Amino acid sequence: MHNRCMIDPRLITLRVFARCGTVGATAELTGYSPSAVSAQLRELQRMLGMQLLTKDGRGVRLTATGRFLVAGSDALIAEWESLRAAAMKAGDQVQSHFGLGGFSTAAAQLLAPLAATLRSTRPLLEVQVLEANPARCFDLLVAERIDLAVIVAMQSDTYGEDDPRFEQTVLLDDPLDVIIPADHPLASRETVTLEELASEPWITEAAGSTYHSLFTAAFTAVGVTPRIAHEAVEWETQIAFVGAGLGVGLLPRLAPLHSAENVVRLRITGKGKPARRIVAAVRRGSISSPLIQESLGILQTSANRILAARPEDDL
Amino acid sequence: MHNRCMIDPRLITLRVFARCGTVGATAELTGYSPSAVSAQLRELQRMLGMQLLTKDGRGVRLTATGRFLVAGSDALIAEWESLRAAAMKAGDQVQSHFGLGGFSTAAAQLLAPLAATLRSTRPLLEVQVLEANPARCFDLLVAERIDLAVIVAMQSDTYGEDDPRFEQTVLLDDPLDVIIPADHPLASRETVTLEELASEPWITEAAGSTYHSLFTAAFTAVGVTPRIAHEAVEWETQIAFVGAGLGVGLLPRLAPLHSAENVVRLRITGKGKPARRIVAAVRRGSISSPLIQESLGILQTSANRILAARPEDDL
DNA sequence: ATCGATCATGCACCTATTGTGCACGGTTCT
DNA sequence: AGAACCGTGCACAATAGGTGCATGATCGAT
């Protein structure tokens, strides 16, 4: 937790609060206790001589001044990250701690190799990996709990693609496959189109959950409205449902099917080739840091290796 | 000492160290003990994972990385000052502490009225005034011990007129007068030229001291090389020397002659009208802060009042 | 060459900041 | 009315961060 420095940690806490709106959630995200967050915010106001928060029902809310300060602090944070990165580069220095974040399949296939490589090339560096969904990864970046995140790009309602707080780099596009029961009439095919599966009962994530938008986007692209029969939270569960003959589903190429019985994975053809875009995100300004640069290189290498293992028409 | 905040105080300490070069001097300027400064710098290096200092003889010296960091931090500090000022303005907030610095005559004629006015208009604000020479005022600004300084502009070897760390505002030009013994042949005149006094024995500050450059600049402008007979540290002493008939001297209009016996003050005419320029200096970015703005207004008013009391040909 | 001056730093110690855990009061929803 | 939730105040504990003194290293002057 030594990462929170240089810029007063209380300001970082305020930024996290601005994101999640309650003291409790801020505490959870920053790793402090609620009382600590409360005390920090109070102290910050006292120190700056500004009223940043107002009572609002049973919670608290940012004042106009508070929102102004948070908005303006983006540039300040970026300035510092940039200076730090430049100094690290100029001085050929090494940092001691590096926090990584990512979702499960990314963690397995991209972050794990990255961590392993870094561990061998930089033995002094203590690498910490946190598994978290994309939205939380952004939160953790803001909270300075992690320094680099590998996530699925999504037009989140809270974090845009060009958010001034981050810089994002595309690593690879991960196509979505169809999984169907082994005894399904189409199971012997190599490829299918979504149109062919339009009338099937679909299994997906709950609406509003992390990757649900991938599902809807895929069908929107081809103008088909699927019938959602079942909902699952984990890929594993979804696979099991498909194996039990409850319906069909979409599964990203990177998500392993393991040796699931009774389930077949088919590539999707047709005009809409659904895919999820996997990107690396860092705090704005920090991208020129040598460690970040090296990490992005390693990630890109892993991504390229994955791409190289695919049939050409899939790239 | 709550003023040092937001940006890690250790970085401020590093900046002060970069200015004065030794741990001891940094300690004196910042108000810490030498051990504290040493510990801070050590901790800063550990935290950033950068080597900022190297042993150099019996002292320490900045590494290239250290210099880089210090240079880059100018923009960071300015960014924060700017954000803070904007937030104060946007939120119509008040700060609780305000540090002023200036040299003696400025303190008497400009800072004292300013402090008095602020005390009445903003009773909650605790104003602290520090008397210090211009170079030290800049140091104190960097060290964040003061927020505004009223000084004599000078082409210092360490702080230039367009230093990226400060913003300066001209308040007024304070002409230099000649003081001569009352029994001097020229004492009955209203005005003199420096050429007329070229052969007189001059009394001045010690070479290298704060305002000595004013003296040399005045004579350089008219191409005369004065004979320096005596040296004094304080204006009072200089006046006493003149009163004792030891020679003649230059005295800024703002410096009071009190009721010194045997001494006459004469205006200087001729092509070179020597003057010292009095300016207000603040940390870059902070100039748009409401409190700074109000202070500058008050100072300008005081300055205008002083100017208005002068004969027209002297403005 | 020696002695004193200067400078940075380590150590013992102390203080004050800043964290946690728990209890409490206010607010909203049912 | 009651339950759930949210923020905050308080006692207490840990730790960051300060001072003062002693020490070692280096430089300059005698």
Image (cartoon, coloured by chain):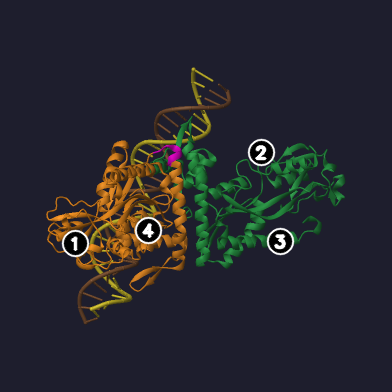
Chain colours: A orange, B green, C yellow, D brown
Mark 4 highlights which residue? A13
Q: Is residue A114 magenta?
A: no
The percent position of residue A305, horizontal first and vertical second, equals 29, 43
- State the residue position of label 2: B208
**Labels 1 and 4: the sequence-earlier one:** 4
Q: What label sits on residue A248 in the rendered view? A: 1
Q: Amino acid at mark 2?
A: Gly
Residue type at mark 1?
Answer: Val
Q: Nearer the viewer, mark 2 or mark 1?
A: 1
Q: Of the residues under marks 2 and 3, which one precedes in the sequence?
A: 2
Magenta range = A88-93
Q: CA distance from mark 3 to mark 1?
A: 84 Å
Tell me the tag on residue B6.
none
Both labels 2 and 4 in a single chain: no
**Depth check, front residue: B108 or D14:** D14
Give neighbour class at mark 1: few <14, some 14-19, many 20+ (Cα, 10 Å).
Answer: many
